[in-house]
Image (cartoon, rainbow, N blue to C red):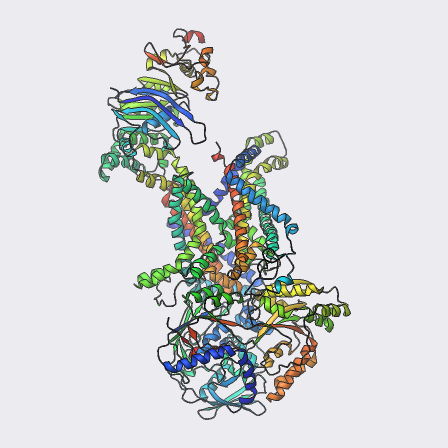
Amino acid sequence: MLHTGKKRVRKAALIGLAGALVVSVSACAESDRGDSGSGESGGTLVFGAAGKPKNFDPIFNDDGETFRIQRQMYDTLITYKPGTAELEPGLATEWEPSNEGKTWTFTLREDVKFHDGTDFNAEAVCANFDRWHNLPSAAAQSQAIYYGDVFGGFAENKGDATGEPLYKSCEADGENTAVVNLGKAKGAFPDAFGLTSFSISSPTAMEKHNADEVTQTGGAFSYSDYANKFPTGTGPFKFESYKPQNNTVTLVRNDDYWGEKAKLDKVVFKIIEDENARKQELEAGSIQAYDFPSPAHYQSLEDNGQKILSRPNFNILYLGINQEGNPKLKDVRVRQAIQYAINKKQLAQNQLPRGATGRDQFLPDTLDGFTKDVEKFPYSQEDAKRLLKEAGAENLTLKFYVPTEVSRPYLPNPQAVGGAIADDLEKVGIKVETVLRPWNGGFKDDVQKLGKQDIHLLGWTGDYGDAGNFIGTFFGREKAEFGFNNPEIFDALSRADATVDDAEQKKDYEEAAQKIAEFIPAVPLTSSPAALAVSPKVHGIVPSPLTDERFSTVTVEES
Amino acid sequence: MTPKLLQRRRERIDELADAGDAGVSLAKDALRRMRANPVAITGAIIVALFVVLAILAPFLAPKDPRTQYAELKNQLTPESIPGPMPGFLLGSDQYGYDLFSRLLVGAQQTLIVGVLATLIGVAVGCTLGGLAGAFGGWVDTALMRFTDILLSFPSILLAISVAALFAETNQWTVIIAVSMVAIPVFARLLRGAMLAQRHSDHVLAATALGVRRRTVVFRHILPNALTPVIVQATLTLATSIIDAAALSFLGLGDPDPSRAEWGLMLAESQQFIEVKPELAFLPAAAIIIVALGFTLLGESLREALDPKKRR
Amino acid sequence: MLRFIVRRLLQAIPTLIVLSILIFAWLRALPGGPATAMLGDRWTPEREAQLNAALGLDQPIWVQYWKFLGRAITGDFGNSTVTGLPVIEEIGRGFTATVELSFFAMVVAIGLGIPLGYLAARYRGRLLDNLTVVSTLIGVAVPVFFLGFLAKWVFSSQLGILPPSGRQDVEINSTSVTGFVTLDGLLTREFDATIDGLVHLLMPALVLATIPMAVIVRITRASVLDVLDEDFVRTAESKGLGTATIRRRHVLRNALLPVSTTIGLQTGLLLAGAVLTEKVFVWGGLGSLLAEAIELKDYPRLQALILLAAVVYVVVNLLVDISYAIIDPRVRVGR
Amino acid sequence: MALLEVRDLSVVFGRKRQKPFTAVDGVSFSVAAGQTVGLVGESGCGKSVTSLAIMGLLPKRGVRVSGSVTFDGTELLTLSDKQLRDRRGRDLGMVFQDPLTSLNPVIPIGLQVTEVLRRHRGLDHKKAQAEATELLNKVGIPDPNRRLSEYPHQLSGGMRQRALIAIALACQPRLLIADEPTTALDVTIQAQILNLLKELVAGTDTALIMITHDLGVVAGLCDEVNVLYAGRVVERAARHELFADPRHPYTHGLLGSIPRLDSARSAKLAPITGSVADNIPWADGCAFAPRCPNALQGCVEQPPELETQDTRLLRCYNPVLPATTAAKEG
C-alpha cells in the first residue's frame, strides 16, 4: 500500500459522506457477523437482475449486468474500497509506477488459488496480460472493448481495429512480483487496473476451455466454453450454473477464498427484465434485492418495508450542443443563454430519483479535477432572454434530439426529461423542434456520427475514478457530436491525461474543467444516484458509485 | 386449395358483404330496428359523446395541454404527483401537464388515431377491393392473393411487425401499422359486396338498359355496397384504438409524451399506479368505454343488417 | 392425406424464401444495428465499424444472405447478439414457454367458453344469457396488457397470493426434459415443480384467455342457437332420445363445427396476443424474445423468429384443415 | 275406440308483450288403428303445429297448448317430459318434410337408425346394426350395409327420405305422422315414396296421419280427410266423398286449383283469390270470408260452427251446392 494512500483518501471522505447512511448499516451488519462466525450456513441471496449476461469471461464484457455477476467470482489486481471509487489492494497488495509511468510493478498476494486449484502468481498475471494483448481474432478484439479502450490496441490489430498498443510486455519477477511495461504513460492508471474487464482468470482453465475462441456466425458471436460454462477466477463465489430456461445464474461460496469468506452459501441472479415485475417479486419475497428501482416506486417500496439504497452520484446528464448544427450556437452568449434557461434543480426534482442534483460541471464532486471555482449560470429566464437578444438570436429555432427506447440511471425517462427541457427553452423564446430517435435505431448515428442535431440529450456513468474518463471522453478531441474545434481544451485534456504525478494531474484537470465551463461545449444538467431496492432481511450490501457491490459481506436473515 | 382458416375469415367477411345486398331500403329498415334496440342506443350515445368531446376538446380544456405548469411542477416528484388543486381539476400528470385537459385532448388524439387508421384501412382496402370487384379477371386474382397474405397474419402481430419495420415510431407509423390490419378486411368486404350487387336485379336492369359500366359501378353498385363497409368501419374503430394502445405498451407507439393519446397515457403511467392511480385508470376506463361503445354500435348495426335475422 | 400434407408444406417453401429475403434486406436497411446495440454507452463510430467488420455485416448483403441461407438449411440460424446463445436453442426454449402458456390459455378459453356459450344459448334471453353477452363484449374492449397489469396488481401486489412473473420459482430445481415446466414435473416425478408451474401459469393463462374465450362464447352461442332450430334436432326429439344424447350427439357436434374453425383462428391470434401477455408477466417466451430482439436489433434472432412465425402459421392452418376434415364428413369428399 | 283422439286442441304462440297468435284453434279429430287420416291446408293453416303438438315437440316457452290429446287412453299433453320421450320413437313416429335438413349431417346414417333402436328396444350394438340393415332393406335402399356407414350428403334425396322413414318405423310405432313427406322431392320420386308409405302401413295396425297441402297426395292414400283453414277444421269427409263433392268453398277452391285429367281441356284453373294475409279473426266471423266467392253478410258477423251435414262435418253458412260443382265451371 505504498503509493495508494494520499491521493485517494480525500476522495474516500467525500464519497463516503454520500454513502454514510449505508456504511453505517454495513457497519452494524459487520458487528452482527462477529457472533455468527464465518463459514457457517448463510442462506441464499436471490438478486433480481435487469438483463441477461452475455457470457462470463470478463475481458469480453462491458455491461453492468454481466459485470455484477463476474465481480462475485473474480478479483482484479487493484480493487475499489466498498462504497467508494477509492482504490484498495486486490490480488496485488502493492503497486508502484516507475520509468515516468511507463512501468507498473505489482506485488502480489500470496497463497491465493483459482477455483480450479491453479496457483495464483506472477506468471498467471502475465499470462492474462499476454492473452489480452494477443487476442487472435477480429471477433475477440471487437468484444474486448475496455481493453481496446484503455490499452489502445492489440499486438496485431485485426479487421478494422486500429491504434497503437500501449502494452509492451509483462515479466514475472519471482513468484510474487509482476512488472508490466507500457509504451507511454497514461493518466487512467492505476485506477483502470480495477476495471472488472481486467479480472484475472486461471491460465489453466482458459487453456483447457479455449478461452480465446470467439467465432462469428451469422451476424453474431459465439463464445468459448470458458466464457459460457467454466469461468474460473479467485473470487469469493464460484460459478455453478446458468439456466436460461428459468433465467437464473447460480454462484456458490468459494470455501477456499483468500480473504474473508462469504457468508452466503449461494447467490442466485434471477433475470427479470421488467422493473415492475422486479418490484413485485421483491415484495412477494421471491427475490431479496434488485437493481434500478423506478423512482416512482421508491415510496411504495419503503411503505412496504423495503429499503432503498442510493449509490453515491457518479454520473452526469448533459445537454449536448452541436455548434455545427446551427451557426447561432457558435456564439458563446447563446450557449450561456441555454445554460441560464434550464431549471436544473426543478428538473432533478420532477423527473429524476431522489438525491439527484443539478450540476454546474461535468465532474462528480469526489473526483480529482473537480473544482468549485468554475463559471456558473444559475437558472434565470431574464438573463437567458437578455443574452439571446444581445446575440441577435431572439427567433432561435433548435432541433433537439432526444433518444427513445432507453433507460439509464442518469436518464430514467428521456422523453420526460426532454419534454421538460424543451418547455424551459420555449419559455425564454427558443423554438424547439424535438426529434425523437430510438437509442439503438438512429440516435447514436445521427448525433454522434452525423451531427444532425442542434442540441441533444446524453449522459455518462464513470467507469473508474479518473477525471479523464469523464471530460476526456467528451471533449478530448474534435467530434461530430459537439462540432467545435478548441485546441486549448484538447491540449489541456491530453496534457492532464499524460501527467503521472497526482497533484499536477489534479491541477491540470481543474484547469481543463474551468476552460470547459467557460466555453460551454455542452450544458451539464444533473447527476442522479442509481439505487438498489433491498429487502429488510438483507444486510451488508454497500452501494458503490461504480455499481461495484460485492456480496461476500452480505447476510440474509432467515424468514 | 385454400387453408380453412383463411377461408373462414373470408367467409365471415363475405357474410357481411351479402348484407348489403338488399340496398338502401334495407338501411332505412335497419335504422328503424336500431332505434328500438337499447344496445344500439347505448353504443350510439357513447360514440356520440366521445366524438363531440373529441371535437370540442380544445375549447373545453381549461388549461393548455401542451404546457407544463410551474404550479404543478413545484410539487411534482416521481414519488408524489400533485392531486387536484385550484384551476387543475384532476391535478398533475407525471410530466407537470394538467391531467384533466390532457384527458380531454386525449379523446381528440385517440379519435384521430382511430379514425385515420380506419380511414386508411377503408380507403386503401376499398380501392383494392373496388378495383378487384370492378375489373375482375387477373386484377381480381392478383389483388385478392395479396390481401389473403395480409389476412393470414394475426392482427396485432401484423401491426407489431409493421411497426418494427419502421426506422422509428411516431404517430404516423402507429396509424399505418394499425391500418394494415384493416386493409385486407375492407378489400375483401367491398369486393364481395360489389359482386353480390352486380348480380342484383336493379344492376342487371341498368346494365340491360345500356347504362355505361362506370355509371353502373358508381351510381348503382357502390352506394349499396357501402352499407357493410360502414358496419365494419365502426367495429374497426374499436379494435384500432385498442391496437394502438397495445403498440404503445410494447414501446412501438408514438413516443412523444407531449401528444396526449389515451393508449400512450395508459402505457406510460403504469409505474405510477401507486403514486397516483388515476393516471392509469382514467385513460384505461376511457379506452374501454369508447371501444365498448363502438363495438356495441357496430354489432347491433351488423345484426340489424343481417338478412337472416330479419322477420 | 399424407400427400396433401407434404404438398402443402412444399408449397410454403417459396413463400418462406421470399419472406426471408425481404426481412433480411429490410432489417439491414434500417438505421442502427446490432453493433450499435451491443456497444451501448461505449458506442463510437469507429468501434461500430470495427464491430461490423468482425460481425461480417460490412459485406455485401447478398453475400450475407447466401451465407445465412447456407447455414439456415442446416438448421443453424446463428447466435443471438444479445445473449451469445444459439438462436435455435433460445427459440426452442421460448417456443415451449409460449406453447405451454397458449395451451393452458386455450384450455381455459375452450373449457369455459363452450359451456358458457351453450348455456347462454339454452337460456336465451334470460339473465345468464344477457350477462354472458355483455361480459364478452366488455372482454374484447379491455386492452389485454392492462388486464394483465391489473390482475398482477390485485393478486400479487395487494393480495399476495399469486407470483407476479416468470414460469418457475427460484427454489424449484427441477430437471428439464421437454422444456414444458408442468410436464417435466410429471415426467420426473417432481410434482412440486408441476404445481409451481401451474401456480405461475394461472394468472397469465386466464388473462391471455379472455379474448379467445369471449369469441368462443359468442360463436358457440350463435351456433347452438342455429343448430337448435335445425330440423334434425326435431327429428332427434321425435325419436324420443334422451336430452343428454340429443345435446351431445346432435346439437353440440354440429354446433362445434364453426366453433372449431374459430378455435383454430383464435390459436393463431393467441400466439400473437401472447406477445403482450408475456411482456406483462415476463414470461420469457417467444413474445419476450421478439420484443427484446426488436429493441436490441438482434438480426439473427429476428430473422429466425419471423420465419418461425410464418412456419407456425402454415402448420396451424394445416392442422385446422385436417381437424376440420375429421369433424365434418362433408369435407372429406369435397377434397 | 280410436287410437288417437284429439279434442279441442288449441295452440297459442305469444311471448310477453307480444300479441298472441292462435295457430291451432279448437281442432278435434280421431284416428283409429290401421286408418290413414289426412290433414290438408295451405301453409300456415296449423296442420304442422297440430302434428308437433301431438308429438309434444313444440317449444316450451312462449307456447300455450290446451285441449286434450289421448293416445290409446293416455293423455299426452300432461305427460312428463321423460314419459313423453319414452313414447316418442316407440309408439309415435314422425317423418319430416325436408330429408336433407332432417338428418344430422355429421353422423353416419347407421347411427341415426340404430340410436332409436337402442333407445327403445335396448338392442346391443351388433343387433341394432343388423336390425338397421334390415330396415334399410325394407324401405328399399339398396346395398344397406354400405349405406349404414355413409353420411346423409352421400345419399340422394329419395334415399334420404327412405332413411327417415326407416328411422320413424324402426320401432314399429302404432301411429306414424308424415308431415309433407314428399314436398321436397322430385315428382318422380314423390310417387315412389307415397307407395312405400302405403305399402308399409298396409296390412299393419299402424295408424297414419298424412299432413299435406297437396290434395293429390291425399287422394291416393287417405281414408278420411280433414281440411284445415286458419287453425280450424272447415270440412271433414271420407276421401271419395270429399273429392267427388267438396262442399266448403275453400275445399272447393283447393280442388279447383289442381289440374284434373277428367276435366275439359278448355277448363281454366280457378285459383283461390287473395292470400292468408286477408284472413279475419275467427272471433269476428268466418276467417275465409274475405276470400270466399260464396261469402254472405252473415259470414262476417258470426263465425260458423262445425256441423254435421249428411256424412260429413262442415263449417259454412253457404256451402257449395253438391249438384253445381261441374256445371258452373262450364
In the depicted structure, whether residue D11 falls above or below residue C260: above
Seen at 57% across and 89% down, the residue is: A102
Q: Position of residue A121 (x, y in %)?
A: 44, 88
Relative placement, left or right, of C211 versus B263 is left
Seen at 36% across and 41% down, the residue is: C252
Q: Position of residue A511 (x, y in %)?
A: 66, 83
Specify whether residue D266 is in view: no
* Quadrant in which the C terminus of chain A appears: bottom left
Residue toward you, B11 or A188: A188
Residue toward you, C202 or D149: C202
* Residue sitting farthest toward the front: B86
In the depicted structure, whether residue D134 falls above or below residue C52: above
Residue toward you, D229 or A543: A543
Q: Position of residue A553 (x, y in %)?
A: 43, 79
Q: Position of residue C248 (x, y in %)?
A: 33, 41
Relative placement, left or right, of A471 versus C128 is right
Relative placement, left or right, of C216 versus A497 is left
Specify whether residue A540 is in view: yes
